[in-house]
Image (cartoon, rainbow, N blue to C red):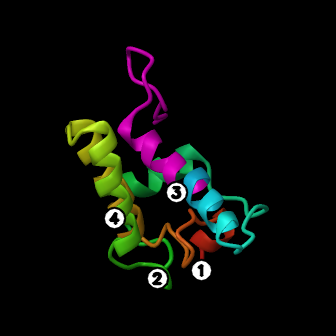
Amino acid sequence: MSISATDANGKFTAEYAAYTKLVIANRLQNQVNGNGYGNKKSINFEQFMEAIRKGQVVNHNYARPVSLEEVRNNQIYEQNNGADSFTRQRFFTIARAYELGLVDSNGILVSSVEMKA
């Protein structure tokens, strides 16, 4: 089953917004903070959605509740974009990724190698 990054109207889905937050935004934040995470390869969107769909922990070392930093970032996101169903689904998907061990200790989506750890 293929899951698209856009809906029928050509708009990005909340799940894709969550994916890009964990791959791009958090990576940039790490670089700004001097953590130098630029070369890490994260799983692709299809792998991400398959893991979310299955609902099984992919890396027990990273499985945890969503971070307080993500909660704060989401509050800012809601202030700027509204607290609609898209925003709620985006945050739910981010939180689910944390719970399933898809997000490493720096808040970046894992690589396919890390999924098997």
Front one among 113 and 84: 84
Mark 3 secondary-structure assignment = helix
Which residue corresponds to the image point at 56% horizontal and 53% vertical from the top-left? Answer: 25
Left or right, residue 36 beside residue 78: right
Q: Quadrant of the N terminus?
A: top left
Query: Disc 2 or 3, which lies upstream in sequence?
Result: 3
Q: Nearer the viewer, mark 4 or mark 1?
A: 4
Q: Give the position of the C terminus as an image quadrant.
A: bottom right
* Mark sitting earlier along the chain (4/2): 2
Q: Which mark is residue 117?
A: 1
**Residue 21 picture location, percent across and down:** 50, 51
Residue 60 is labelled as: 2
Q: Which residue in the protein does label 4 denote? A: 72
* Mark 4 surroundings within 10 Å by alpha-carbon count, few (fewer than 14), some (14 through 19), many (20 or more): few
Relative to 94, 42 lies left or right = right
103 left or right of 33?
A: left
Say which of 91 and 68 sits in front: 68
Sequence-wise, which precedes: disc 4 or disc 1? 4
**From the viewer's perspective, is residue 72 above or below residue 116?**
above
Residue appearing at x 45%, y 17% in the figure: 10
Query: Is residue 49 within the magenta segment?
Result: no
Residue behind mark 3: 22
